[in-house]
Image (spheres, rainbow, N blue to C red):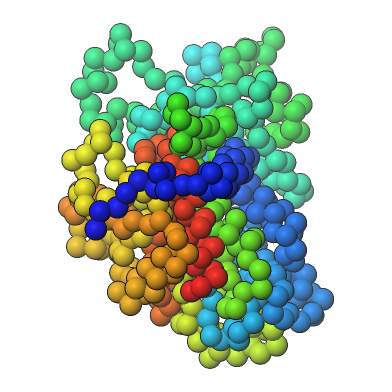
Amino acid sequence: MEKKCVWEKYSKKDLEKLEKICKKYRKFLSDCKTERECVAEIVRQAEEAGYRNLQDVIRKEEKLKAGDKVYAVCMKKAVAMFNIGKRPLEEGMNILGAHIDSPRLDIKQNPLYEDGDLSYLDTHYYGGIKKYQWVTLPLAIHGVVVKKNGEVVNICVGEKKDDPVFCVSDLLIHLAGEQMEKKAAKVVEGENLDILIGSVPLKDEEKEAVKKNILQILKKEYEIEEDDFISAELEVVPAGEARELGFDRSMIMAYGQDDRVCAYTSLYSMLEVKEPDKTSCCLLVDKEEIGSVGATGMQSHFFEDMVAELFDRVGEYSGIKLRRCLKNSRMLSSDVNAGFDPLYASAFEKKNASYCGHGVVFSKFTGSRGKSGSNDANAEYLAVLRKIMDDNKVNYQTAELGKVDIGGGGTIAYILSLYGMEVIDCGVAVLSMHAPWEVTSKADVYEAQKCYAAFLKDA
Ligand code: MN
Ligand code: MN
């Protein structure tokens, strides 16, 4: 059962392909730091590859047939892509699923204030974070401000070389005696994660002059007023590009690799599919980090509704056929796994941990304690996948998320499994998951892409 590091197995051709995909992956991570930015880029790439908007197909009352490629977008934050296969839809699809939201700091609806001649934006964190990791880092603001007249102002500050950045300050060590005695969860409190945005007062203003100066800049640069924060979605994320890590450049350090490493490799594989036998589907959703809730999370009806529309366009919609299609489908629910970290070895059970550079990870189940909250994939399905991986020379490993009693986590797998389809958790090992900068191995990015391509072809 010993699994080995995959790097030694690679030919020169493998390494060329690996570098090609990892370079594109790094660009995707650098350009797409919010779910909206991800969806816009995914749609751009899909259209370039011949995908059409399903809504246009519906409006024009066109029919779809084998070989046609369509995508559907949910509120600019989730997307489903379909490549229609030769076999009847009723026989099921091969589905790649992943999420495109990541932990971050969201700007509140009434965020702007001034104190001590400094101006700040108040935030509310999104997803599970170690709050102390988010101080004293260069941060960028990405998002939209929607004005009362419906006009959408896109904001992205902190990414270009000469852009300003923002930060959350921390108490100097000299005065931190009391703070250093606190538990890690309390060292930095959520309410203290406010970002510093300015310090120059507006001339001849007595009250809140620094804040007023900021408002003047916002008015000049973006034509927005303080009230407009009410209808805004602004996300504060680590500033800067995805980088290669290590003297050997074998790893990638970047923000948002949970779960864009799986989302990007799934997209990449989906775009490569040519005339599939079974219909291929790639489903990239929002809100996983807060429980897959809402209209754009996996629990919404979006996906089921789009499959219903697909049936309608293929010309054979019926409720029972839709149910059969979902039941007969197979899915890889892809999300990151906790890569074994020798510095924190006691959190892992070594035989059942994932290792960076050991290939794509299959987790029969996730959950916490007694598998609570998990989808537990069937042995029969694992057997099918083992054969597909071996036939396609994909390097894979199996893992649980840490030691049995130590913690756990969930994914979108259990939601899709409710249709009766075969679903398994699958993904890429990550170091420092949910930290502002997460680490993956390029080899695992490459193996994940090979895994998804093999799955779409042979499952
Ligand atoms: Mn995730
Ligand atoms: Mn996560």
Task: Identify the residue at the far front of this view.
Answer: 11
Q: Residue at x 63, y 12 (%)?
A: 201
User: Residue 295's spot in the image, x, y percent?
Assistant: 54, 63
Q: Residue at x 56, y 52 (%)?
A: 264
Dividing the picture into quarters, in which one does residue 74 lie? bottom right
- Residue 430 falls left or right of residue 12: left
Residue 203 appears in the figure: yes
Q: Residue at x 53, y 32 (%)?
A: 243
Q: Residue at x 57, y 32 (%)?
A: 241
- Residue 53 falls left or right of residue 174: right
Residue 134's place in the image compared with 127, above or below, is above
Residue 234 appears in the figure: no
- Residue 406 falls left or right of residue 39: left
Q: Nearer the viewer, residue 231 or 311?
A: 311
Dividing the picture into quarters, in which one does residue 217 lie? top right
User: Residue 389's spot in the image, x, y percent?
Assistant: 42, 65
Residue 348's place in the image compared with 328, above or below, is above
Task: Identify the residue at the far right of this view.
Answer: 60
